[in-house]
Image: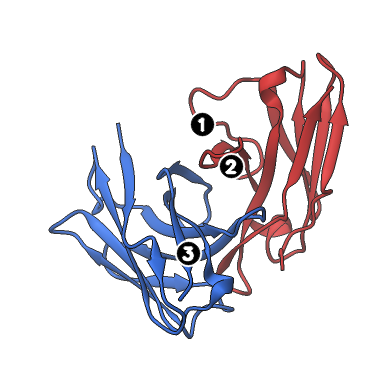
Chain colours: A red, B blue
Amino acid sequence: QAGLTQPPSVSKGLRQTATLTCTGNSNNVGNQGAAWLQQHQGHPPKLLSYRNNNRPSGISERFSASRSGNTASLTITGLQPEDEADYYCSAWDSSLSAWVFGGGTKLTVL
Amino acid sequence: QLQLQESGPGLVKPSETLSLTCTVSGGSISSSSYYWGWIRQPPGKGLEWIGSIYYSGSTYYNPSLKSRVTISVDTSKNQFSLKLSSVTAADTAVYYCARHFQLHYGMDVWGQGTTVTVSS
C-alpha cells in the first residue's frame, strides 16, 4: 500500500504541459518535501528532483517541482515522446522513520 | 562515475532467506552523508522502500518488513547486503540498490536491478 497518493494516469498532447500531483501529510511531503523519479519500462528509476525543486545535474529545465502544504507537484513543459514514462514521488516520513513512495503516475504523451 | 551493481540468486524457495549484495564502484561506500538503500518493485507494480544503511552500520527499515529484513555493510569490500527471511511469492520483485544523500534527500544513483522470483 502506497504511503503517498498519486493519480494513476495522466494524458497530454505533444509540446503541452503536464502537472503531476502527489499528496502526503505533515510528516512526509509537508515536512521534508518530495523527490520525483522517472522510470521508463524495463529501466531503473531516475531522480528528477529532490527536496521539492532541486534538480540533479543533467536534468532538463523542462522538469520543475513545487510544494504547497502536503501536496507536491511535478510540472513537465514542452512534452516530448521520451517523457512518456511512469513517475513516482517519494518522501522521508519523520513519524515512521521511513521512506514512503506514491503508487506512480503513468504519463502518456499523445 | 559512481555505479551500483546488484548480485545474488534469481530464484529463492518459499520460507527461505533471500540474500542480495550491492557492489559500489567508482566511489567509496564510506563517503560521509550518503546512505545506501534497497528498494523493490513487484511485477507491474510500484516502488517499495525496504531499508537503508549508513557506512557506520546505522540502519532504517520499512516498518512493514522490519521483522524479516537485515541490511549490513562491508566497507572493506565496498558492498552492502540485504537479507529477507521467510519469503513468499509476494516477495517476487525486481530488487534495486540505490544511494541517497543524507537521510531525507532523493535516491540519485541506482543499480540496474535484479529479478528475484520466489517459487518452489
- Considering the numbered disc 2 on the image, is that residue within a helix, a strand or a loop? loop
Neighbor class of circle 2 (other Cα within 10 Å; few <14, some 14-19, many 20+) is: many
Q: Chain of mark 1?
A: A
The answer to whether the residues at label 3 and label 1 have Cβ atoms under 8 Å apart is: no
Looking at the image, which is closer to me, A44 or B42?
B42
Cα–Cα span, label 1 and label 2: 8 Å
The residue carrying mark 3 is B117
Determine the residue positioned at 55% across, 39% down.
Answer: A42
- Name the outermost residue toward the left: B76
Q: Label 2 belongs to which residue?
A: A50
Label 3 resides on the chain identified as: B
- Report helix, strand or loop for mark 1: loop
Residue type at mark 3? Thr
Q: Is there CB contact under 8 Å for labels 1 and 2?
A: yes
Residue A97 picture quarter: bottom right
* Three-letter code for the amino acid on which mark 1 is drawn: Pro
Q: Amino acid at mark 2?
A: Tyr
Quick one: quadrant of the C terminus of chain B? bottom left
Q: Is residue A13 above or below residue B15?
A: above
Image quadrant assignment for residue A55: top right
In three-dimensional space, the C-alpha distance between marks 3 and 2, rounded to whole angstroms, equals 32 Å
